[in-house]
């Protein structure tokens, strides 16, 4: 069983601060996805990182995939109240297809106080 | 275009009753997934359908849970003899099946099930 540990589980900060959330595993993944989920809605894909060491930027969000493809981080610069939500990472493996190829972490609950 | 839709959005039932939850995936998406999300938790995989292949039922928590997908499109998740621990948000997602690319899943808004 592949496990993804996300930390911190909960984070509440003031608007304008920077933050980093982490997604760690002892397993190697083909790629890793980050989703954001708002209350009452399903998760929405933010980014997919594929190559070890890859860094992707999405406006104020910076995503990094570890060199060994076992971990990832999400850094938010100058957080805004609109960034509030549950951030989920999901590790992808190819084992002939199938849902066992996608493992979700438990998420980081992020609250940005105005 | 239309996204993944689920119905009902909320369902309150009494312990021991059966419930059916419906999912309409994005047109053309061959893969369909059901997940369960308990309060404040991540996603727990339940079942996966891919085209006409036999579904991957490895995540179903008990034999009270079953699902079907008719005509490769609409899916129904059935929970028999519901228990209070079945209370959760049930999410459906669909995706294009492409082994060359990471599988982006498009999620519906979920059905919030409350078992009294």
Image (cartoon, rainbow, N blue to C red):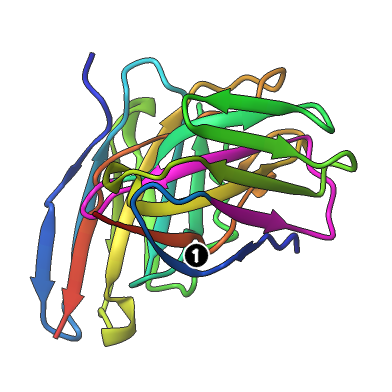
Query: Which residue: 32% across, 17% down?
Result: B27
Residue A38 in magenta?
A: yes
Q: On the image, which quarter does residue A55 sit in?
A: top right
Can I make out residue B105 in this image?
Answer: no
Q: Position of residue B52 (x, y in %)?
A: 51, 28
Q: Position of residue A87 (x, y in %)?
A: 46, 51
Indicate whether B47 appears above or below B1.
Answer: below
Task: Looking at this view, name the residue that lies furthest to the front.
Answer: A16
Indicate whether B3 appears above or below A102.
Answer: above
Query: Which residue: 41% across, 32% down?
Result: B94
Q: Position of residue A97 (x, y in %)?
A: 69, 34
Chain for numbered disc 1: B
Residue B69 relative to residue A76: left or right: left
In the image, the segment drawn in magenta is A19-41
Residue A67 in magenta?
A: no
Q: Nearer the viewer, residue B115 or A91?
A: A91
Query: Which residue: 14% across, 86% down?
Result: B116
**At numbered mark 1, what does the secondary structure look like: helix, strand or loop?**
loop
Q: Nearer the viewer, residue A70 or A14?
A: A14
- Looking at the rendered image, the quarter that the C terminus of chain A falls into is bottom left
């Amino acid at each position: 069983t592949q496990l993804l540990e996300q930390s911190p589980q909960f984070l509440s900060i003031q608007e304008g601060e920077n933050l980093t959330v982490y997604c760690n595993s002892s397993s190697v993944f083909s790629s890793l996805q980050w989703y954001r989920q708002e209350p009452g809605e399903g998760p929405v894909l933010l980014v997919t990182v594929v190559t070890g060491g890859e860094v992707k930027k999405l406006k104020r969000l910076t995503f990094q995939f570890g060199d060994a493809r076992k971990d990832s981080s999400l850094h938010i610069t100058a957080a805004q109240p609109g960034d509030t939500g549950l951030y989920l990472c999901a590790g992808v493996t190819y084992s002939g297809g199938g849902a066992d190829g996608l493992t979700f972490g438990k998420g980081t609950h992020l609250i940005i106080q105005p | 275009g239309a996204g993944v839709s689920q119905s009902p959005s909320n369902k309150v039932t009494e312990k021991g009753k059966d419930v059916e939850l419906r999912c309409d995936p994005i047109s053309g998406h061959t893969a369909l997934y059901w997940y369960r999300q308990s309060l404040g938790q991540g996603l727990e995989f339940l079942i996966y359908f891919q085209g006409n292949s036999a579904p991957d039922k490895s995540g179903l928590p008990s034999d009270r849970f079953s699902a079907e997908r008719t005509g490769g499109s609409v899916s129904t998740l059935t929970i028999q003899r519901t228990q209070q621990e079945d209370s959760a948000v049930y999410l459906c997602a669909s995706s294009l099946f492409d082994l060359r690319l990471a599988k982006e899943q498009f999620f519906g808004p979920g059905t919030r099930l409350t078992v009294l």
